[in-house]
Amino acid sequence: MSRAHAQALIAVSLMGSVPMMVKGIEANPWTIGIVRLLIATVCVAVFLKDGRRVFQHRAEFKPLFLIGLAFALHWATYFISIKMADASIAAIGTATYGIFAAMLGSVMLGQVPNRIQVFAILISLVGAVLVVGEYSIGSEMTVGFIFALVSAILYAFVPILHQKHVHIPVNVRTLAQYLFALPVFVIALPWSNWDLKPIDWGGMLYLGIVNTVIAHTLWIRSSSVLPAYMSGILFYLYVPISMILCHQFLGEEMGWMRITGAAMIVVASVLGMRSQLAKRPGKQAAADG
């Protein structure tokens, strides 16, 4: 297993707790976004020697800004989705990122998946449909799931933008992703809520350090190297992890359809990763290491 694959698996495992944490605390989407991004921006800036480069090169400013904007809109729609629907349903909707990442990677980067990987993507999609279950049109669950799908589309653009501008140092791109996402949430400051309990602040601290500084930074590094369809397949592991945590700590339903769907997603993830490792050329292997 390459370093990039290992980083991706660690990142997804850590990020799997995000839906549970966001749903479980009283802070609203705007408060959560502001706190997480402030923590991430400060932490990355402290350890980044060439942080000023974010603003120094005019040619780099636009792509760096777009990375941050896409990430901010992904977060905003995802947090709204989690608050409206079951946290696990929101996670499943956002995990369709894999489908959109494969499509965008094929169109924008020429990364065409092979037949096994296409099959893995389709299995994952069917699994996601099974997990959704039966919800009426117009219900909060359905609307929340739609927000999650929008979030997935927005998130799929992020690794594509990173790969298109891989000549910019990864630490600079990481700082830009957090820094330029922050203004979107600051604009929504009037709608944020700050009358919170210690447990809510503890939850946001966990979200900021573990789920953002550590997990998202690892994900940026891995998804900048792995083909978009590969990171998409690995991201589906987010679903069963989120489901189990939401069931254990939030008491969310975990019927046979959700379990079957989650199992299909895990199988598809393993199948897709094995296929990529088997065909990986030497040049890509060197880049991953």
Image (cartoon, rainbow, N blue to C red):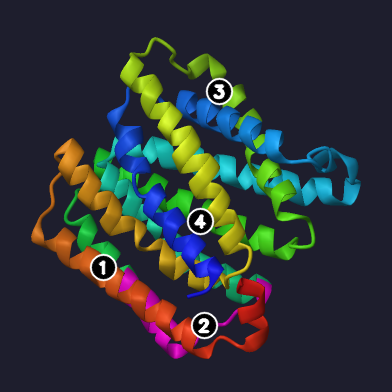
Left/right placement of residue 15 relative to residue 171 reads left
Local secondary structure at mark 2: loop
For the residues marked 3 and 2, what is the alpha-carbon distance in whole angstroms? 39 Å
Answer whether residue 27 is visible to the viewer in this image.
Answer: no
Mark 4 lies on residue: 153
Q: Which residue is mark 2?
A: 113
**What amino acid is labelled 2 in the image?**
Pro
Q: Secondary structure at mark 4?
A: helix
> How many angstroms separate mark 3 from mark 4 (CA)?
22 Å
**Which label sits in the foreground, 1 or 4?**
1
> Sequence-wise, which precedes: disc 3 or disc 2?
2
Q: What is the distance, in whole Å, between disc 2 and disc 4 at their CAs?
A: 18 Å
Circle 3 residue: 188
Find the magenta span and give its range. 109-124
Give how far across and how far down residue 227 sits, in percent.
57, 73
Q: CA distance from mark 1 to mark 2?
A: 19 Å
Q: Residue under circle 1?
A: 127
Three-letter amino acid code of the residue under disc 4: Ile
Q: From mark 3 to mark 1, how far is it between C-alphas? A: 35 Å
Q: Residue at x 69, y 38 (%)?
A: 47
Report the front residue among 126 and 278.
278
Quick one: quadrant of the C terminus?
bottom right
Q: Specify the amino acid type for callout 3.
A: Ala
